[in-house]
Image (spheres, rainbow, N blue to C red):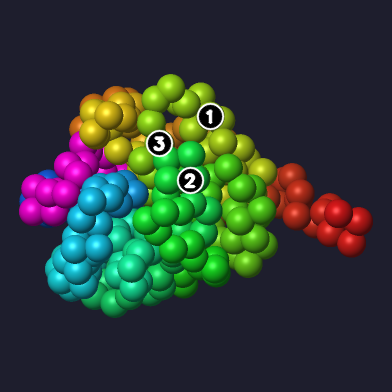
């Protein structure tokens, strides 16, 4: 059972500027591949940002971007995860394509839309969870606001998730919510969490970054801080399984009661 070498690629997403975002990510994928990463997580809506005025038009670029990610993942023997706009009639889905060594291992459409910022007006909500069986292990996906709904992460854990990946655009001033909820999802489900946030000013919102990689005990293995850059950590499944055996929370559940 080989460890996963995980990376989170934190950067300042440029709303509506697909070419600039793609240029940044191409270079970042090369950097993390050079560091031996076989899992790379990108922010939420990394290709286009939440550019509502021309979101449908920007979504038409996604098919071509996925094709390029397939090529990059095959070339570097890597799993790449991050969300982009997917066309869906007069709205779009906020969609993660799990790209694994030249193949699509799964697709997850953001289930919980952040109505406070009007996401429900521009996006369609997904209606199914995803546990992707990849070349490096079983990976569950949640996107940003999904983090506030523990039922989804628990379902992924019950289905066998070893890692939950969290692409996000989570702004100030809710840094402590982000950090606490990520650690809670890791601790309560006894699994690894790889979370990638955007950073810097994006439109009128200020993003604090703080992308993190967290172990099954809830310890933060890597924290990106507020600026652009990449973080890395090794995810050892044997260490995770030993911890689960030491404190067998899942065996002591009472689902018939609650």
Q: In the image shown, does 65 or 201 lie closer to the viewer? A: 201
Residue for point 13% across, 54% down? 18
Q: Earlier in the sequence, mark 2 or mark 3?
A: 2
Q: Answer whether residue 75 is visible to the viewer in this image.
A: no
The picture places residue 231, in percent across and down from the top left corner, at 29, 38
Region rendered in magenta = 6-21
Q: Earlier in the sequence, mark 3 or mark 1?
A: 3
Q: Residues within 10 Å of mark 3 (few under 14, many from 20)?
A: many
Q: Horizontal placement of 117 versus 183: left or right?
A: left
Residue wearing tag 2: 114
Q: In the image, which disc is placed on residue 177?
A: 1
Q: CA distance from mark 3 to mark 1?
A: 10 Å
Q: Horizontal placement of 239 versus 250: left or right?
A: left
Asked whether the beta carbons under mark 3 and mark 1 sit within 8 Å of each other, the answer is no
Q: In the image shown, does 231 or 185 lie closer to the viewer? A: 185
Residue for point 47% across, 26% down? 174
């Amino acid at each position: 059972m080989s460890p996963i070498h995980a990376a989170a690629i934190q950067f300042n997403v440029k709303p509506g500027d697909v070419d600039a975002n793609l240029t940044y990510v191409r270079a970042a994928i090369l950097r993390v591949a050079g560091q031996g990463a076989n899992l790379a997580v990108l922010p939420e809506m990394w290709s286009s940002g939440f550019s509502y005025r021309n979101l449908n038009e920007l979504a038409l670029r996604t098919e071509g971007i996925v094709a390029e990610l397939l090529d990059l993942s095959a070339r570097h023997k890597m799993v790449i995860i991050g969300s982009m706009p997917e066309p869906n009639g007069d709205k779009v889905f906020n969609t993660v394509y799990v790209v694994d060594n030249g193949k699509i291992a799964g697709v997850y459409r953001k289930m919980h839309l952040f109505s406070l910022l009007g996401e429900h007006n521009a996006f369609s909500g997904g209606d199914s969870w995803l546990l992707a069986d990849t070349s490096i292990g079983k990976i569950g996906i949640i996107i940003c606001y999904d983090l506030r709904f523990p039922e989804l992460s628990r379902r992924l854990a019950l289905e066998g998730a070893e890692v939950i990946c969290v692409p996000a655009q989570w702004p100030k001033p809710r840094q402590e919510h982000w950090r606490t909820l990520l650690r809670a999802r890791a601790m309560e489900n006894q699994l690894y969490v790889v979370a990638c946030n955007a950073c810097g000013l994006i439109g009128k919102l200020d993003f604090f970054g703080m992308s993190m990689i967290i172990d099954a005990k809830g310890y933060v293995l890597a924290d990106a801080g507020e600026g652009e850059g990449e973080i890395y950590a090794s995810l050892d499944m044997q260490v995770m399984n030993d911890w689960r055996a030491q404190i067998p929370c899942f065996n002591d559940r009472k689902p018939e009661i609650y």
